[in-house]
Amino acid sequence: MISLTDTQKIGMGLTGFGVFFLFFGMILFFDKALLAIGNVLFVAGLAFVIGLERTFRFFFQKQKMKATGFFLGGVFVVLIGWPLIGMIFEIYGFFLLFRGFFPVVVGFIRRVPILGSLLNLPGIRSFVDKVGESNNMV
């Protein structure tokens, strides 16, 4: 079992609440207050989980500046009150930032009994195979 420090546990909670508020904000027709809270909690939780220095190094790598610009720009656009446009920027930036993790996630989900069968359905399989490739979303 993975041992987490208290700071990392707090970060996991903040990240979880951030994802919940982002999801709930999108379900409620892009409620800007919920999306703003979700954005702040998600970024703060990420900083707590991996540490402040590693968070800055992750976001501000030379090859990830475009992705960081879209992601943080989307957060800013949501905070100033244009939630739909901001979420489009954020989602694009998120996929660019975390595209290296997608093959790992897809491989893990394929080993989960019920979800693995769903990912092997004909229409879904080709899409998941493309998402699972790490270098296709440039």
Image (spheres, rainbow, N blue to C red):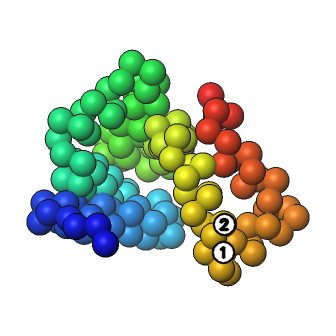
Q: Residues within 10 Å of mark 1 (few under 14, many from 20)?
A: few
Report the front residue among 119 and 97: 119
Percent of width and height locating residue 85: 50, 42
Looking at the image, is mark 2 or mark 1 nearer the viewer? 2
Q: Residue at x 32, y 26 (%)?
A: 60
Quadrant (top left/top right/bottom left/bottom right) for the C terminus: top right
Residue 99 shows in the view: yes
Report the front residue among 91 and 11: 11
Element type at mark 2: helix
Task: Name the residue furthest bottom.
Answer: 114
Q: Which residue is mark 1?
A: 115
Q: Which residue is mark 2?
A: 110
Task: Name the residue furthest left.
Answer: 6
Mark earlier in primary sequence (2, 1)? 2
**Is 110 on the left-hand or right-hand side of 67?**
right
Tag of residue 52: none
Specify the amino acid type for callout 1.
Leu
Q: Can you tell which quarter of the image residue 113 is in?
A: bottom right
Percent of width and height locating residue 36: 31, 54
CB atoms of marks 2 and 1 within 8 Å: yes
Percent of width and height locating residue 1: 31, 72
Q: Can you tell which quarter of the image residue 122 is in?
A: bottom right
Percent of width and height locating residue 7: 13, 60
**Is 70 on the left-hand or right-hand side of 35?**
right
